[in-house]
Image (cartoon, rainbow, N blue to C red):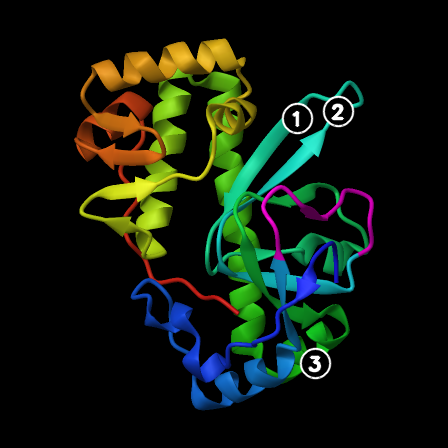
Amino acid sequence: MGNGRPNGHIVSCDQCPLRALSCLREFSPDELAFVKTFKIDELHVEAGTSFLREGARSDHLYTVLSGWAFRYKMLDDGRRQILNFALPADMVGLQGSLMHEMQHSVEALTSLTLCVFPRSRLYDLYSRFPSLAYDITWIAAREEQLIDGNLVSLGRRSALERTAYLLLHLYVRAREAGLAKDGVVVFPFTQQHLADALGMSLVHTNKTLKRLQATNAIHWQGRAFKLRDKNLLATIAGEDVPAPQGRPFI
């Protein structure tokens, strides 16, 4: 089950705290009954642990129950590119389950709790519950959409634009996951993580963040990030504010 340890207490799908999030669609009774049997364990992963590694075969896929993680690739010389961040309700490991081996690694950014599902039962899910199969397809398509946005940032947006874009989308995703309070999100990542996601040096990232804060669109002190002017940040990013939409999870 990757580099982690089984959780002593397993949260029942009936009592799953993610089901209280307004952005997530509700299961039908039959779907919920299946998901309860599909989930076989929970895994607790300490911050800084890569629990899925590039090139490794994954017998399981996971849903983030609590905490943050990030997907990344390492170059031979040690340079790291963060591909995306995973928040509660996001699925990780699907690539390794369907393609037999991971093409990227996944690291716990914070202490992480994961719901564990066996790859061997994916066909059972697809054959018996087309609605859940569609949900997994939707999740994969959404991940592709997020990667597309990041690719545009790396290829065409200026340093200020790509920083604004990433922070805007991370704030919106964190808010949907119930992690925002009074417009403030405690981001668990460092400027180095941000630099690795933006494809910039740490020095360039620091200077760009200072420029962004000078616009008064955001305030970021310590780990507390406050979105002061969402429309201004979206204008800087050259991107409309993502509209709330219901989405599935497993």
Q: Secondary structure at mark 1?
A: strand
Q: Can residue 135 be seen in the rendering of this structure? A: yes
Taking the spot 47% from the left edge, 17% from the top edge, the residue there is 156
For marks 3 and 2 on the same chain, the one whose residue lies earlier in the sequence: 2
Classify mark 2: helix, strand or loop. loop
Query: Pointer 1 and pointer 2: residues touching (CB < 8 Å)?
Result: yes
- Determine whether label 1 and label 3 are within 8 Å by CB: no
Question: Quick check: marks 3 and 2 in contact, CB under 8 Å?
Answer: no
Q: Within the image, what quadrant is residue 84 found in? A: top right
Q: Which SS does the magenta portion mostly show?
A: loop
- Specify whether residue 158 is in view: no
Quadrant placement of the N terminus:
bottom right
Mark 2 sits on what residue? 75
Q: Secondary structure at mark 3?
A: helix
Q: Which mark is residue 124?
A: 3
How far apart in space, not on screen, are marks 1 and 2 (Cα)? Answer: 6 Å
Instruction: Tell me the magenta residue range.
Output: 45-57
Mark 3 → mark 2, Cα distance in angstroms = 37 Å
Q: Amino acid at mark 2?
A: Leu
Identity of the amino acid at label 1? Arg
Identify which residue, 128 or 102, lies in the foreground: 102
In the displayed structure, would residue 176 be above or below residue 61? Answer: above
Q: Residue shown at 35%/17% (left/top)?
A: 209
| Residue 239 covered by magenta stretch | no
Image height of 132 relative to 245, above or below: below
**Above or below, comparing residue 129 to residue 199 in the picture:** below
User: From the viewer's perspective, is residue 172 above or below residue 208?
Assistant: below
Q: Is residue 111 left or right of residue 37?
A: left
Q: Residue 131 bears which disc, if any? A: none
Sequence order check, earlier mark of 1 and 3: 1
Residue ID for mark 1: 80
